[in-house]
Image (cartoon, rainbow, N blue to C red):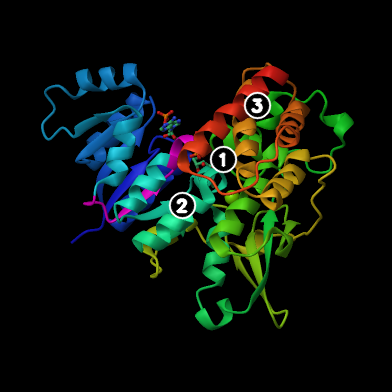
Amino acid sequence: MRKQITILGSTGSIGTQSLDVVRAQGYSVFGLAAHSNTELLMQQIAQFHPKFVAVVDDAAADRLVRELQGMSHAPILLRGKEGLVNLAAMEESDIVLNAVVGIAGLPATLAAIENGNDVALANKESLVTGGHLVTKAVEEYGVKLLPVDSEHSAIFQCLQDPYSAKSLKKILLTASGGPFFGKTRQELEHVTKQDALRHPNWSMGSKITIDSATLMNKGLELIEAVWLFGLPAKDIEIVVQRQSIIHSMVQFSDNSILAQLGVPDMRIPIQYALTWPERCPGPAPELDFSLLQSITFDKADEETFRCLAACKRAIETGGLAPCAANGANEEAVRLFLEDKIPFLKIGELVEGVLESDSFGGDYSVENVYECDAAARAYVLEHA
Ligand code: NDP
Ligand code: MG
């Protein structure tokens, strides 16, 4: 039987690259989900023949109904946020790859796990906002949570030997440094959306590209690593590796270090999440060492890039603090992309929200959404 895959966020950067992997591996597509890009979704339907599609936006779902009329073997359409969750929950999928952007991905991650589906997780915001709910559900339902984020895939790959994994001492989480590496706060005062959207090594969706420019992405990844690998934040060191060739490293109790290397191509970690524990030939190219001039290392500048410091503080505070930082960031990035706030304001708002409350304690899924809404309201009030 061919593996049945469901891809949530199939029209995005990770979603389309996941479909490259699916094509290369000859997997079968069970379900696809998007927010509103029905044009691309229609092309994917024609090519991959999913049994189900979910469209979150109402007007887009209406459009798709019209476009699917008369199509032979048309997929069944599920609508709205509920449709996304229902698709994630369907037990016929062997694995659900969640590549939705933002906290909008959390309900689907939980639904997939609670219905016994393994999850390949690109949507880091699921772990940042609901880390303890997601990890508890993974344990309770006995499913696999496979990282897609390149750094976390690298760490996961370095921890495959269970004997070594037991003596994990430290994680060296690599960062490209983004388009503004080496700049001062003064130099960043007037950078534009176009400047921030120009990432040196990776081509990604606009939200994560801005997160990479502010280093919020590295902060979110630090929190993601705490939940995935169980080390406290103090044992996760950020190492700037400008060329994005070393995707992360782990250090064991004897101070031996293992790293995972490769071209910066997300299809490698996506494929590893889908084929794990096996490795297979895939669409990503080889790393050509003869073209590589150097591999450099630097320190991350937390004074200039406030989001990273804020995320460290959030995970150390615990409870809902990471959720608040994430909600504030999502809203601030939206405002920055609409030219409503300057670049540096994003970090100030994320820091500001953390100062506005105590956030400690255990939490429920309702608390997560309330905290997210409160953080967004804080941003709108202070922008
Ligand atoms: P994109 O913006 O390119 O794609 C986002 C996808 O999610 C699209 O399919 C979009 O649909 C869909 N979507 C957007 N909003 C909603 C919503 N409210 N409900 C349901 N679906 C929605 O993002 P990326 O692919 O870059 O990133 C996806 C996730 O993967 C993020 O969490 C990101 O942090 C993570 N990630 C991305 C990497 C990358 O290289 N791009 C690397 C590592 C992690 P539509 O097209 O219809 O709007
Ligand atoms: Mg990453």
Q: Does residue 349 appear to the left or right of 326 in the view shown? A: right
Is there a contact, CB below 8 Å, between mark 1 and mark 3? no
- Quadrant (top left/top right/bottom left/bottom right) for the C terminus: top right
Q: Which residue is mark 1?
A: 203
Quarter where residue 61 is shown = top left
**Callout 1: 10 Å neighbours few (<14), some, many (20+)?**
some
- Is 32 in front, or is 179? 32
The x and y percentages for residue 71 are 13, 27
Between disc 3 and disc 2, the foreground one is: 2
Q: Which residue is mark 2?
A: 134
Q: CA distance from mark 1 to mark 3?
A: 21 Å
- Is 204 in front, or is 153? 153
Residue visible at 57% across and 79% down in the picture: 166
The amino acid type, in three-letter code, at marker 3 is Ala
Q: Is mark 3 within 8 Å of ligand 1?
A: no
Residue 163 in view here? yes
What secondary structure is found at the residue carrying circle 3?
A: helix
Residue furthest front as drawn: 361
Residue visible at 22% across and 41% down in the picture: 50
The amino acid type, in three-letter code, at marker 1 is Ser
Q: Earlier in the sequence, mark 2 or mark 1?
A: 2
**Callout 2: 10 Å neighbours few (<14), some, many (20+)?**
many
The amino acid type, in three-letter code, at marker 2 is Val
Residue 383 in view here? no
Q: Which mark is residue 333?
A: none
Q: Which residue is mark 3?
A: 332
What secondary structure is found at the residue carrying circle 1?
A: loop
Q: Is 104 part of what is drawn in magenta?
A: yes
Q: Which residues are magenta?
A: 91-106
